[in-house]
Amino acid sequence: MAKRTPLLSSIAAAAVLLAAVAGGALNGGLGETAQASTNGTLAATAGCGKAPTLSSGTRTISSGGQNRSYILRIPDGYDRNRPYRLIFGFHWLNGSANNVASAGYYGLLPLSNNSTIFVAPQGIDNGWANTNGRDLTLFDDISRQIENDLCVDTSQRFALGWSYGGAMSYAVACARPTVVRAVTVISGANLSGCNGGTQPVAYFGIHGIYDSVLNISAGRSLRDTFVRNNGCTAQSPREPSRGSLTHITTTYSGCREGYPVQWAAFDGDHTPSPVDGSSSPNDSRTWTSGEIWRFFSQFASTTPPPTTAPPTTAPPTTPPPTTPPPTTPPPTGEPGACTATYRTVNTWPGGYQAEVTVANNGAATLNGWTVRLTLASGQAISSLWNGVNTGTSGSVSVRNAAYNGTLGANASTTFGFTATGNGAAAPSGVSCTSP
């Protein structure tokens, strides 16, 4: 991210400092960490239905006897009766809450379509030493303040961060497993401690294969904590070779239902914004934001919406229409076999997110599929998941990934992508074939 260059330009100094911090954390740096929260009740928060007093911007809060701060981003058109997803984005060493907020909370803000409340806490000395659990206490205090004032879905709390921010996200997963639904740790290590660390939490780890600040072995170690906790089958995921300029994402098998573990290794150094096909990090072209958003948004809400009293009188009945409703053209593709249906998920200035549903409408099983589409002029795919694409602009084909190519009768799967350009222009010639 553009604001991250002070850290990236001083990798050697950061490596020395982070190594020292890691030594302290691994040798018991959390002597008196606050106990893990047990507030796991699945319900909408006290702020639901209330006129909010909080607003977007920098907030101050008293936490652990200190004045702390955070940046809050409330969705446009906030509805006090709708429970929202809550995401904490922790900054990196020598970074700041403002850096996280100005970079769109690791690129998730433009993908959220006003479905999410975002928080960027500020660390003491621009880090997350979490001495005596002070940063976990800050997490608790901010959560309490927000949830007492705003409507939050308590089954949809998440945390993520890069480098030191990844370490803090890992600490939250260890100590608050009944609070957070999932975390993403980008290029992290055990720097902020792990108080507890025995309960399942959905986990996504991302790390560069030649990280010169926090070696990839540190990221693997964090990942393996939740491979064990989540009951996943142990394995050694494939990782790209140096010089390949690509990434490989692996979803573990055998995990407890609702507690997946995912691991993405990329051919790169210590960065939150790797780009396939390039050695230069770039916020707008990185694949990480799309994959993180997909990982977080896969979890269905288990919070019932706020109850509303039923009407006191029966609604008026309406006779059925005398003419049939207008028909909708079926999705394109071979009738009765493989079909592809395109939709735009979200748009923002200069980019958009899209999803394609691939369905088998026939009686026989499909063993592999390929979707073809032609993007409008000026559109280019920046990241794609759940498929393998050939081409990024103009005529593009997407074939199934290794895990979603077999579709039984009436089964379906999806792939998605983020792209630059005008999202209002739908692609032409969307079709699906199966070998």
Image (tube, grey):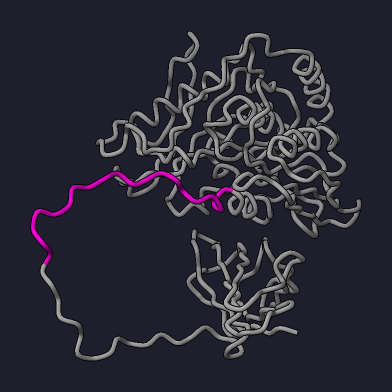
Q: Residue at x 68, y 80 (%)?
A: 365
Quarter holding the N terminus is top right
In percent of width and height, residue 45 lies at 36, 34
In percent of width and height, residue 105 lies at 56, 42
Q: How many numbered marks have been drawn onto this rendered protein structure?
A: 0
Quarter holding the C terminus is bottom right
In percent of width and height, residue 133 lies at 60, 15
Q: Is residue 230 above or below residue 277?
A: above
* Extreme-right residue of the structure: 242
Q: Nearer the viewer, residue 383 or 256?
A: 256
Q: Which residues are magenta?
A: 296-315
> Is residue 224 shown left or right of residue 301?
right
Q: Quadrant of residue 20?
A: top right
Q: Quadrant of residue 201?
A: top right
Is 85 magenta? The answer is no
> Is residue 172 shown left or right of residue 68?
right
Q: Nearer the viewer, residue 30 or 278?
A: 30
Q: Is residue 153 above or below residue 324?
A: above
In percent of width and height, residue 363 lies at 62, 84
User: Magenta residues: mostly which secondary structure?
Assistant: loop
Q: Nearer the viewer, residue 78 or 263?
A: 263
Q: Residue at x 85, y 51 (%)?
A: 239
> Is residue 26 shown left or right of residue 154?
right
Q: Is residue 253 above or below residue 326?
A: above
Q: Residue at x 48, y 71 (%)?
A: 424
